[in-house]
Amino acid sequence: MKYFQEKAETMPLEELKKLQDEKLVKQVKHVYENVACYREKMDAAGVKPEDIHGTADLHKLPFLTKDDLRDNYPWGMLAVSKADCVRIQSTSGTTGRRVVAFYTQKDVDMWEECCARALVAAGATNEDVCQVAYGYGLFTGGPGLNGGSHKLGCLTLPMSSGNTDRQIQFMQDLGATVLCCTPSYAAYLGESMLERGIGPDDNPLKMGIFGAEPWTEEMRQGIEKILGIKAYDIYGLTEISGPGVAFECAEQKGMHVNEDHFIAEIINPDTGEVLPDGSTGELVFTSLDKEAFPLLRYRTRDICILSRKKCSCGRTFIRMTKPMGRSDDMLIIRGVNVFPSQIETVLLKEGYAPNYQIVVDRVNNSDTFDILVEMNEEMFADTVSGMTKKEKELAGAMKSMLGINPAIHLVAPHSIQRSEGKAVRVVDKRKLLSDSQWKG
Ligand code: DLL
């Protein structure tokens, strides 16, 4: 089995363009009529649905950002009635005004089909046993790959993340041939198996579908070696549906964007100007088929390159590089989205000055997350046990805001280096990606 939906995945370019043109005209009308926020944006930009005749007019439409979604939380972006929705999912790591995405049954089906396409592109068939070790719940990783695995007809093991002993036992006992999880968890699982004497030839796995966070080619090789599998990348974001917006094929030179459902553009993040294929810039998506949560020109903040070069796998869909970074300050730590502003909010609430530095590193394929926080003068006079207690309390407050536990280090007042320009809030030592990774 080479494709899950051959007709769509290998559609000649002119046909694909025609399909996108038709779908876009309909989608703009749907959004204009049903989403007040977007109607206001279009009115302010002087654009009416009648002005959009196809993808050539896409640039006339205004952008949407995460702030628009937060400002319209929870119901503001919903384009169908609540009764027509069957599901919500939500972005990881943000509290307060989270981004909540809605799905009709048709939206869920389309999303799951995209995930099934990714599984087939990696070589899976209905004979496979698919172990889904992404988190289940509001996060889209577990539900998305679970649904894709069902659509393909694999025997699905809905493990969710964590509980490594049980993961290993079920993998061995039930003969899992496909592993779906974050790349860092795949690497951790591989090491844990090795510690238990299970080498690359002693497990039933054949392939893995890994994404939701940046990972390098070196990490791919490491995972492939330790687990004895082929490792494939998968990309997506909650706002656009979840995993499966783009996926790797056997060629492994970038990820094919499911262009019958999503239009991808690259823009200059500072000016909003649309850039030609091959340029590095911010990825923007328009969802052509989503009914409940149809976003037009949504700015992902992910920086990457698109390539229309022909692919030997036969798919005609455009390919995107792995994201090379972000045009905002969002960090992905252990799969969770973290904004420095959230850390600042907690510090102020807990009575600290916002003098801090976040240090992220990757040790043994697992992210470390440290926050250096300056004490005020009174705290400085405190005892060692008093400080340890304060560090623990602050770590607890951070955990409830971020969803993950940082190590807090209280440091002397004025000891964090002051910068003359913008404060250096984040020291990311992971060096996860570079332009040289683009082989497209
Ligand atoms: O991470 C959806 C997903 C789940 C993708 C499972 C793949 C597998 P969010 O939590 O909304 O959704 O985070 C989306 O994660 O904008 C990227 O910055 C980053 N990201 C997702 N996939 C990749 C990847 C899911 N393959 C944000 N490589 C996106 C690098 C990725 N970064």
Image (cartoon, rainbow, N blue to C red):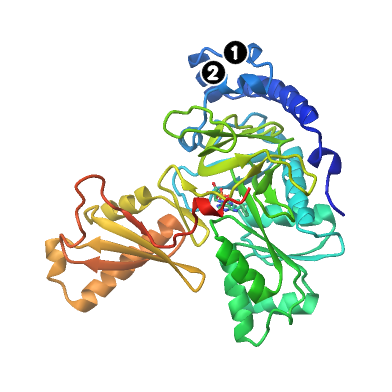
Mark 1 residue type: Lys
Which residue lies under the disc numbered 1?
48
For mark 2, does the 10 Å Cα neighbourhood hold few (<14), some (14 to 19), or many (20 or more) residues? some
Residue 310, percent across and down?
73, 42
The answer to which quarter of the image holds residue 28 is: top right
| In-front residue for pair 325/405 | 325
Query: Is 280 placed left or right of 9 in the picture?
Result: left
User: Quarter holding the N terminus?
Assistant: bottom right
Residue at image coords 77%, 24%: 18
Judged from the image, the secondary structure of the residue bearing numbered disc 1 is loop
Query: Is 40 placed left or right of 210 in the picture?
Result: left
State the mark number for residue 42.
2
Residue 105, percent across and down?
75, 40
Judged from the image, the secondary structure of the residue bearing numbered disc 2 is helix
Q: Contact (CB < 8 A) between labels 1 and 2?
A: yes
Residue at image coords 78%, 27%: 14
